[in-house]
Image (spheres, rainbow, N blue to C red):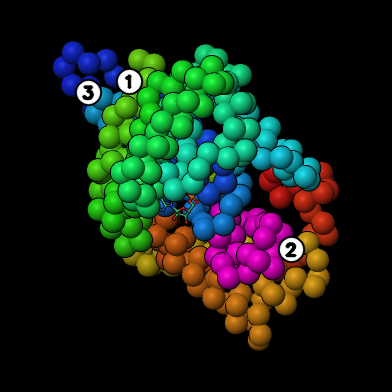
Amino acid sequence: MSALSSPAPAGEPHRAGFACFVGRPNAGKSTLTNALVGTKVAITSTRPQTTRHTVRGIVHRPDAQLVLVDTPGLHKPRTLLGERLNDVVRTTWAEVDVIGFCLPADQKLGPGDRFIAGELAGIKKTPKVAIVTKTDLVDSQQLAEQLIAIDRLGTELGIEWAEIIPVSAVAAEKGAGRGSSAEGSGGRGAGQTGLLADLLVPLLPEGPALYPEGDLTDEPEQVMVAELIREAALEGVRDELPHSIAVVVEEMLPREDRPADRPLLDIHANVYIERPSQKGIIIGPKGARLKEVGSKSRKHIEALLGTPVFLDLHVKVAKDWQRDPKQLRKLGF
Ligand SMILES: Nc1nc2c(ncn2[C@@H]2O[C@H](COP(=O)(O)OP(=O)(O)OP(=O)(O)O)[C@@H](O)[C@H]2O)c(=O)[nH]1
């Protein structure tokens, strides 16, 4: 792998650095990361708090490299897992070059937003950009009101927004033909999310690229594969098992004795639940649900890794894993 990247346009210094999107659950952080990078690197869902791992997406441009760190939502911790997640968020905030604070256009600023903004106000050095997400869901008057409310919030808390940017990830995703290809790099820089990148880049320090060109994320493949399985496993059972599922990929090995033009990757993964009573929900009648989880996530994994996959899933009970430090460590938290 070569770390060479295209030269910056004449006269402009090359910039490289880290940005993270923060915001209350469901604010659109993962969607924005995906739209900017142009492939499915972070897990999106219609339900809050599904982003557990810090997934980096990398935007490569001739003039800059923008490394996106996607954090879980910051929220009042109720379990040990919740506390760990908040620690991850704060550590990330202190390390990045720019913070993008996501606020959905279609929802009035609430206590959740204020809680995060209050924490942000304490991080003086890092430039903060307010990003109004999901602008496709509101009319221009609602959008204007939201922009004003955010400006006021900044004044109130002593935060000086480097920018306040309205953006819709949906239009950019449509343009990128999302879902049809894992190599959807055509989405990079598309439409409104491209403009967002244009505004973030000048806030990065000058410097050469940090990652080889072509890398989309440095998250270990195994973790991304586990996330894709977890997302599929949660589908349709979120009400019953909102936060009770964890997935660990035990092994990823190329199948031996395969012809070079027909490779196959064997993936063995365990789906952990908290109680034996949840087994039936995950597995479904005659194993039908688990089969579906397998085939759905396999498609995403194959798209991500670019190779055919044999996926072997097992459901295991890890009693009350969210409250048990030993289990949490084992499950990668
Ligand atoms: N209409 C519209 N929907 C959006 C947009 N961006 C995100 N969404 C939807 O909003 C929901 C939440 O988006 P996510 O990207 O998962 O939000 P998140 O902030 O990463 O959520 P957590 O992982 O819970 O912190 C999903 O159903 C998205 O499809 C947008 O620009 N327009």
Outermost residue, bottom side: 286
* Disc 1/disc 3 C-alpha distance (Å): 16 Å
Q: Please, is residue 38 above or below residue 148 in the view?
A: below
Q: Sequence-wise, which precedes: disc 1 or disc 3?
A: 3
| Residue shown at the point (66%, 40%) measured from the top left | 75
Instruction: Name the residue beneath numbered marker 2.
Output: 273
Q: Residue at x 38, y 44 (%)?
A: 142
User: Would you say 162 lies left or right of 193 here?
Assistant: right
* Separation (CA) of disc 2 from disc 1: 45 Å
Closer to the camera, 126 or 110? 110
**Residue that extends furthest to the left in the rendered view of this protein:** 10
Q: Is mark 1 within 8 Å of ligand 1?
A: no
Q: Which residue is mark 1?
A: 202
**Dividing the image into 4 quarters, which one contains the C terminus?**
top right
Residue 269's spot in the image, x, y percent? 63, 62
Q: Closer to the camera: disc 1 or disc 3?
A: 1
Give the left or right position of residue 221, taking residue 271 as reference. Answer: left
84 horizontally vs 2: left or right: right
Q: Residue at x 25, y 48 (%)?
A: 186
**Mark found first going from the N terminus, 3 or 2:** 3
Q: Label 3: how many residues lie within 10 Å, few (<14), some (14-19) or many (20+)?
A: some
Q: Which mark is residue 7?
A: 3
Q: Is residue 58 magenta?
A: no
Query: Amino acid under label 3?
Result: Pro
Q: Earlier in the sequence, mark 2 or mark 1?
A: 1
- Where in the figure is residue 296, as x and y percent of width and height? 49, 70
